[in-house]
Amino acid sequence: MNAPLHREIPPSALLDTDQALAQVSAQWDNDIVRQLTDYITIPAKSPAFDADWAAHGYIETVVRNAADWVLAQNVPGLTLEIVRLQRPDGTPRTPVLFFEISPTKVDTGQTVLMYGHLDKQPEFNGWRNDLGPWTPKYEDGKLYGRGGADDGYAVYAAIAAVQALKTQNVPHPRIVGLIETCEESGSYDLLPYIDALRAPDNNRLGDVGLVVCLDSGAGNYDQLWLTTSLRGMASGTLKVEILTEGIHSGDASGLVPSSFRILRHVLDRLEDSATGRLLPASFHCEVPPDRLAQARATAAILGPELFKRFPWAHYDCGGSTTFALPTTTDPLQALLNRTWIPTLSVTGADGFPAMKDAGNVLRPWTAFKLSLRLPPLVNAAAAVQELKALLEDNAPYQAKVTFESAGGATGWNAPTSTPWFEQALNAASQAHFGASCGHIGQGGTIPLMNMLSEGFPKAQMMVCGVLGPRSNAHGPNEFLHVPYARKLTAAVAQVIAQMP
């Protein structure tokens, strides 16, 4: 006679970890890699980088392909819908793929929410000669191409993890999947979907007790990594106009101030260009003691690899190779710099002719696209307001200085892990990697995490991903580390199996 499903079973007895890894590995090798190879060929750029995304149909294609694949898996108890909403002006919002899987253990009302996204960053340049953003290549366990690791794999890995549970008849709670297509644009379409899915009269998300977000990074490929914090972001375009048209530099320079110099002057209010330190105190915050302790432990694990992982410029100097240097070679400070210290990056520029077309002309205007990464505990909306005032007020030479905000997203600091969650993470990491789970903050932004933390304050957050050393999401030669993805998929299945 079968034991009642509510009987407490030791976590190690719930799932045969070797069988689970073998199953998901076979699925990755025989199917998922092929699915992602096809996915990479489709330039499903996020709306911020493709204003005509609806007409082009690429996002629609990747969503339909993913939906067809999920349905073809015939997962018992699964239902799926491509949810579509419109804006007040009648234009479509980017679609969301939503699936539900019925619970197979005594229903406590708790739900596991699995998250990913299918939209992509733009091409960027500098790809290896035999690679390209839309021309996938699989070699040495790495699948190259835009979006495979960030974050096309997520929906496929999520279903594979559930199938590992189903194969072994391991009881699981109710599971829902939320796969969006606006993440790389700041997830501005996502909140209306969450509101719709949480409608009081038909709450389809349920009471979320565990979030599995498969859109983050890994400190190395040797253990499971839990993301403990995410930076926020404030972005926009800073433009300085001094003339209405270009003027011969021999005639005007020295009398007409350079728009580029004015822009540098304005940025000096924000950043110490010698050190990179952001000057407004309100853009900084105290690092919580538990995050500092975790950073010390992670720095001891990763050491110099924290900065050696990047493709530094280098040159020959007297027979030896000289490499460009990071801002710090101290592993702990390196971790804090990329996770808890605000940082300014200029990610684009306009108003400049191409070098081959650049005559002796004083340009009428200069514009920079700014990306300001904020510490996890700094409010992004307040930072955007302060940034605009700081840059626009009291313009040098009464030039026309404007900062057009592209929005902001507040960062995220994970809730304290409960004992079952911490034990499950370590057990999964030991089972599949032979090492304890690592804890690491990430410098990127996932706007959904704050929404979920506010909506489900008691939920445990398994924020993880395949973006390890040199995977280079957003840049050239992005790759998905397939051996790591296999183990991560099996680890996700094990953590879900151990959920109380």
Image: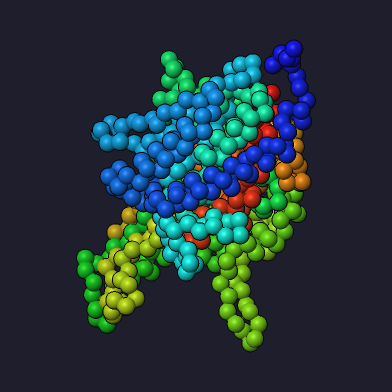
Residue found at x 71% / y 51%: 222
Q: Depth check: give the residue in front, 433 or 39.
A: 39
Report the number of numbered marks: 0
Please say if 3 is above or below 385. Answer: above
- Residue shown at 55% from the left, 24% from the top: 76
Q: Is residue 85 left or right of residue 329?
A: left
Position above or below: 11 against 323: above
Quarter of the figure with the C terminus: top right
Using residue 474 as the reference point, say whether residue 258 is left or right of it. left
Q: Residue extending furthest bottom?
A: 318
Q: Can residue 162 be seen in this view?
A: yes
447 versus 268 height, above or below:
above
Residue 10 spot, x, y in % from top left: 78, 25
Left or right: where does residue 278 sit relative to residue 366?
A: right
Give how far across and how far down residue 402 sits, in percent: 33, 54
Which residue is pictured at 60% across the width and 26% down the height? Answer: 209
Coloring scheme of the render? Answer: rainbow
Locate residue 130, reporting x and y percent: 48, 67
In terms of image quadrants, where is residue 246?
Answer: bottom left
Residue sitting nearer the eye, 165 or 238: 165
Q: Position of residue 153 (x, y in %)?
A: 52, 44
Q: In this view, does 229 lie to the left or right of 38?
A: right
Q: Is any atom of residue 278 visible in this view?
A: no
Q: Outermost residue, left direction?
A: 244
x 47%, y 41%: residue: 117
